[in-house]
Amino acid sequence: MKRLVIDTDTGVDDAQALLMAFAHPDTRVEAILSVAGNVGVDKTTPNILKVLDVVGRDVPVYRGCDRPIVFTPESGEDAHGNDGLGGADLPASSRTVEREHAVNALIRLANEHPGELTLVALGPLTNVALATRLDPDLPQKIKALFIMGGAVHSMGNTQNMSAEFNIYYDADAAHIVFSEWPMLTMSDWEITMRQGLTGEQAEALRSAPTPRGAFFRKITDYTINRFGLEPFLLPDPLAMAAALDPECVARAEKRYVEIELTGQRTRGQTTVDWRGWSGKTPNANIVLEYDMDRVFALLRAAVS
């Protein structure tokens, strides 16, 4: 049984990834942490509760950091709508959020269950970085870390053209995590662009005759109207697929990655040592290809 802690800036694709986690038969979601990113934490936190309403699960939710460690850049409202869920206008949840801060909760959970929890970080790494600073042994207590973030060939999606949004939003946090964690699995923006769904596959998910399917359709209407149906991009679902089913990863390479902090146009760039010239030990398992049939099967289960 996989035991997940999910850290998320709950936007449209984050919600899709949460559906996948709750649908997987060999997975238990132990806790969900909110963080600012796609939209502010005052929106990402209640968005988690709305997903829990859809799946009918009771999982502790912890509110996390409301801003990056140092510098606050643009939000992701353009891609996710002003509520983070594509303007779906979903009713507020009656569920409550735990009083403990997400950073403290992550440290506590790791110490209560050392070596048992897999951490899936779908948004900026602010919570993870601060937890790592407070408990430097945290990386040794977490079974595995999966992230959605980066652009391994510097083809990003932010105003700093070589940087991907999650890393760029809190580059200092990403620097801490990549520097202090001995290994993480990285699903980046470029593989998102390479391996989206077809329009036919997307419509199959959107037309699922279930409450989860209706939710999926509501939250994706905005992004389809904004960006088109095909390719149907899966940033966070791909990262979640890697965590849920290792067989989804068809090809990956372990490389040393560091985060650029000082470049005027490159802050947030994930710089990859593809040739081993740095002599540094690899710290990232970079997913280079997914088995999209397996990924699609996870998504079909998510809306069933």
Image: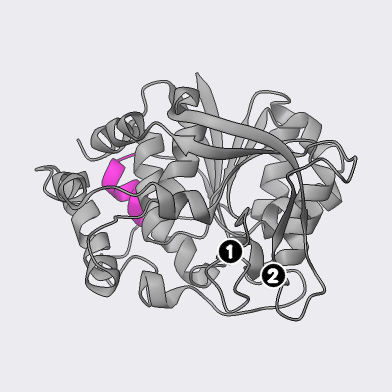
Q: Residue 187 carries which label?
A: none
As for residue 285 lying within the magenta part, the answer is no
Identify the main secondary structure in magenta.
helix
Would you name the residue on which mark 1 appears? 164
Say which of 104 and 162 sits in front: 162
- Residue 242 position, x and y percent, is 50, 34
Would you name the residue on which mark 2 appears? 68
Left or right, 222 with respect to 29, comes to: left
As for residue 51 lying within the magenta part, the answer is yes
Mark closer to the chain start, 1 or 2? 2
Say which of 46 and 253 sits in front: 253
Residue at 35% x, 55% y: name it: 233
Secondary structure, mark 1, is: loop
- Residue 55 position, x and y percent, is 29, 42
Kindly report which numbered mark, 1 or 2, lies closer to the viewer in this rendering.
1
- Residue 25 position, x and y percent, is 36, 22
Residue at 38% x, 69% y: name it: 80
Amino acid at dot 2: Pro
Q: Which of the colour schemes (rainbow, by chain, secondary structure, one colour) is used?
A: one colour
Specify start and end residues of the magenta stretch as a single range: 50-57
Amino acid at dot 1: Glu
Q: Quadrant of the C terminus?
A: top left
Tell me the crowding category of disc 1: few under 14, some 14 to 19, or many 20 or more residues within 10 angstroms, Cα based. Answer: many
